């Protein structure tokens, strides 16, 4: 009898272990399945996925994160001046133009502003330079930020994001090269001084 009871107890422990292992296996499978579904749901590039890699390092925008707008016309939307007055984007047209979409807390925007200031000093008589800030922050502080980095060209603001939305811009900086009739002939992310000068010479002049 004693031997029989031990055998029953042993068999019971074995069954319990098997049930435990089976339960753990099912739980692991559920976790994997949920992870796969989540990965598929969030697959592809989004603005949130591509904004920041690590502190101080942001990805430059690409056609994968910003819609391709080359060949389209600059949208007719009211921008805002430093004093809060409306300024129609259509009034910017009439000569070749460089539009730089930026804001002060964007690390690559910060890096490239001096390049735009330098290009403006070279091509300012032939090409109109325009900075459009879409941060929604106090324009006084944003204006000071750009001016401290040598920017002397026109700065406008897009506080409600209308221009940014119309251009389908999800990541910054984004630069648009526009011909005199308002057609966008090139779009690009962060630029060096040399690359910006080359694009102006080859695309606008």
Image (spheres, rainbow, N blue to C red):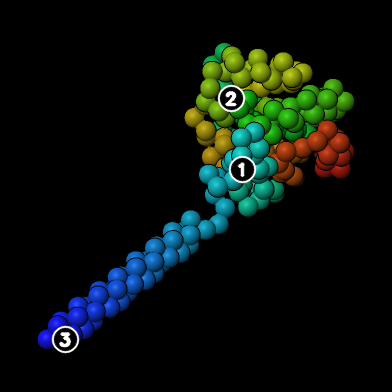
Q: Pick whichever, 39 or 78, lies toward us.
A: 39
Q: Going 29% across and 73% down the picture, which residue do you hit?
A: 17
Q: Going 61% across and 19% down the picture, which residue do you hit?
A: 142
Q: Earlier in the sequence, mark 2 or mark 1?
A: 1
Q: Going 77% across and 18% down the picture, which residue do you hit?
A: 150
**Image quarter of the C terminus:** top right
Q: Earlier in the sequence, mark 3 or mark 2?
A: 3
Is 173 situated left or right of 18 in this image? right
For residue 18, what is the image quadrant? bottom left
Is 32 situated left or right of 96 in this image? left
Residue 42 place in picture, x, y as percent: 48, 56
* Disc 3 to disc 1, C-alpha distance: 65 Å
Residue that mark 3 sits on: 4
Counting the numbered discs, the total is 3
Residue 90, labelled with which disc? none
Residue 121 place in picture, x, y as percent: 84, 22
Viewer-side label of 3, 1: 3
């Amino acid at each position: 009898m004693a031997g029989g009871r031990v055998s029953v107890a042993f068999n019971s422990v074995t069954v319990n272990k098997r049930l435990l292992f089976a339960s753990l296996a099912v739980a692991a499978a559920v976790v994997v399945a949920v992870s796969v579904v989540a990965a598929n749901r969030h697959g592809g590039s989004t603005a949130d996925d591509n904004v920041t890699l690590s502190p101080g390092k942001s990805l430059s925008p690409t056609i994968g994160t910003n819609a391709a707008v080359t060949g389209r016309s600059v949208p007719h939307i009211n921008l805002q001046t430093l004093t809060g007055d409306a300024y129609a984007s259509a009034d910017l047209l009439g000569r070749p133009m460089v539009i730089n979409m930026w804001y002060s807390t964007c690390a690559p925007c910060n890096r490239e502003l001096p390049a735009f200031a330098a290009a403006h000093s070279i091509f300012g008589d032939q090409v109109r330079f325009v900075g459009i800030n879409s941060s929604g922050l106090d324009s006084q502080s944003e204006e000071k930020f750009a001016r401290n980095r040598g920017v002397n060209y026109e700065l406008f603001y897009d506080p409600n994001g209308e221009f940014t939305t119309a251009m389908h811009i999800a990541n910054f900086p984004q630069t648009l090269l526009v011909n005199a009739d308002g057609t966008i002939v090139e779009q690009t992310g962060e630029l060096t001084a040399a690359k910006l000068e080359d694009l102006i010479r080859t695309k606008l002049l």
